[in-house]
Amino acid sequence: MDANIFENYAKAGKILKDIFAALLVKPGDKIVDIADTIENEIVRKGAMPAFPANISINEIAAHYTPIPDDEITIKDGDLVKIDLGAHIDGYIADAAVTFCSNKNDMVVAVQNAVNAAVKLMKPGNKVSQISEAIESEIEAKGFRAVNNLTGHSLDKFTFHGPVPIPNVRNSMNYEFKVDDVFAIEPFATNGSGIVKDSGRTYIFSYLKDHNTRLPESRQVLNLAKKDFSSLPFCERWIKGITPIKFDLAVKQLVAAGAIQPHPVLREAGRGLVAQAEHTVIVRDKPVVTTA
């Protein structure tokens, strides 16, 4: 890996580490304020958000980002999963922490799982070994690993690369190579162990160009391709379009296959969900950019 590329990965990771270290999440906080503060801080520190801040609470597992006038507030005892991405010139750091105002063993389970997995991110080890470590740590605390959410490889301007790391045991034989970059992302639940589409979508990403007569659709697609470098975006990032017209624009673009929706995911059995995540560069001594 080129030294400049390594430095970009490392700097992006340190930015997320510092943000999480300073972040206070407490009952009564509005999640839209948390998201805006985090994203502004990523920019202030010299990076760009790699995707909208995900703030997913309790049975909501992933992909919830606040809408502009979001009234959701943190309640005492909520499991608040904050999943952040930052990039410098396309080189991405991806990290997540679950906050809870009360002691919660599920939070401990995912922290143990990500720590165990990180130690194994060495050349020659296999995906199946990582998955085994993750599920074992989650089961040791009496919970289930979420079957259909995974960690993933990272590449320039690509936050979900082609190689997944399942959180459950498997026979995947992909062998890690020196300087592979991966996001290790365990999810634990006291529910069914499956997540499903909740029917709501607030995050989208560019797929292809599309001719449209609706000016708002053209504006959204142009920003998705150019300003956001094809990385995920949300309504809060699009200025000058009313909520109704934004909704019409994204519906049209999704139907045309021009943008990809990333639906809010909910635990199928309405179980609670906790998450932890770190970004790792594969080496004999793994480099955890976000820790």
Image (cartoon, grey):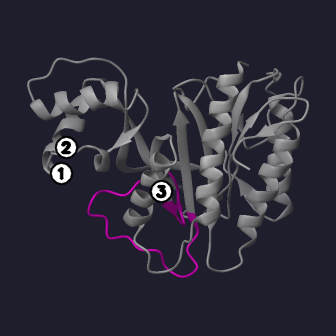
Tell me if label 1 and label 2 are in contact, CB under 8 Å.
yes
Q: Is residue 35 left or right of residue 12?
A: left
Q: Position of residue 133 (x, y in %)?
A: 86, 45
Q: Quadrant of the N terminus?
A: top right
Which kind of residue does numbered mark 3 sit on?
Ile
Residue at 64 percent of width and 39 percent of height: 11
The crowding category of the residue bearing disc 2, from other C-alpha atoms within 10 Å (few below 14, some 14 to 19, many at least 20), is many
Which kind of residue does numbered mark 1 sit on?
Pro
Tell me if label 3 and label 1 are in contact, CB under 8 Å.
no
Element on which disc 2 rests: helix
Q: Is residue 124 left or right of residue 233?
A: right
Q: Position of residue 194 (x, y in %)?
A: 60, 50
Label 1 belongs to which residue? 243
Label 3 belongs to which residue? 38
Q: Position of residue 84 (x, y in %)?
A: 54, 49
Depth check, front residue: 257 or 84: 84
Question: Label 3 to label 1, Cα distance in Å?
Answer: 22 Å
Q: Is residue 219 above or below residue 61?
A: above
Q: How many marks?
A: 3
Element on which disc 1 rests: helix
Q: Which residues are magenta?
A: 56-80
Label 2 belongs to which residue? 246
Which kind of residue does numbered mark 2 sit on?
Phe
Element on which disc 3 rests: helix
